[in-house]
Amino acid sequence: MISRFFLGFQALLFIPYGLYCLVNPGMLADAAGVAANSTTGQIELQAMYGGLQTAVGVLCALAVFNAAYQRPTMLVLAFLFAGLAVTRVSLGLVHADFSQYTLFAMIFESGSLLMLVWLLGRPDPQAA
C-alpha cells in the first residue's frame, strides 16, 4: 500500500510538470536558469523536461494499477533519483550554488531516493 501511494505521488508530480515543460519550455529559464538558444535546444528541453518526465510519471501511474510493475518501477526510479541527487549535491558543493530550485530538487530527489531504498529493502515491497 505504501509503495502504491509513493508511486501515485510521483505520478501526480511528474505528469503535470512534464506536460507543462512540454508546452511551455520557456518557463525553465526563470525557474531553473535553463534556456534554449536554438530550435534544437528547445526540442532538447521539451524532450528531456517534457517528454521524459511525463513518461516517468506515466510509468509510475501504470505501476500504481499493476502490481507486477511496482518493484521494477521503483528500481528504475531509485537509479534515476540516485544519479540526479548525487550529481546535484556534488556539483552544488563544488560550485557553492544552492539556488531555491537546486535546494528543492536536492531535497525531493534525496528524499525520494531514501524512501525508495527503504521500500525496496522491505521483504515484499508490493505488499507495502
Image (tube, rainbow, N blue to C red):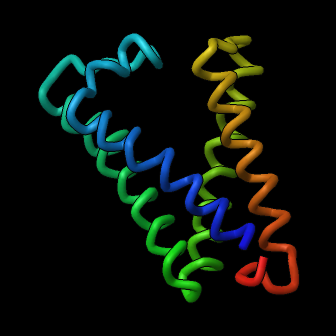
Which residue: 12% across, 28% down?
Answer: 39
In the shown orientation, is residue 35 left or right of residue 128?
left
In the shown orientation, is residue 9 left or right of residue 58?
right
In the shown orientation, is residue 54 left or right of residue 86?
left
Give the image location of residue 54, x and y in percent. Answer: 36, 52
In this figure, what is the number of numbered marks?
Answer: 0
Quadrant of the image containing the N terminus = bottom right
Which residue: 62% across, 22% down?
Answer: 102
On the image, which quarter does residue 94 sit in?
Answer: top right
Which residue: 39% across, 20% down?
Answer: 34
Instruction: Look at the picture and state if 127 lies above or below 14.
Output: below
Give the image location of residue 61, x and y in percent. Answer: 46, 66
Instruction: Identify which residue, 39 or 4, lies in the foreground.
Output: 4
Quadrant of the image containing the C terminus = bottom right
In the shown orientation, is residue 123 left or right of residue 115?
right
Instruction: Look at the picture and state if 55 lies above or below 89.
Output: below
Check the image and name the residue furthest to the left. 39
Instruction: Identify which residue, 9 or 69, lies in the foreground.
Output: 9
Which residue: 56% across, 88% down?
Answer: 68
Instruction: Look at the picture and state if 58 lies above or below 43.
Output: below
Give the image location of residue 124, x and y in percent. Answer: 80, 85
Give the image location of residue 21, x and y in percent. Answer: 31, 34
Instruction: Identify which residue, 84 or 122, lies in the foreground.
Output: 122
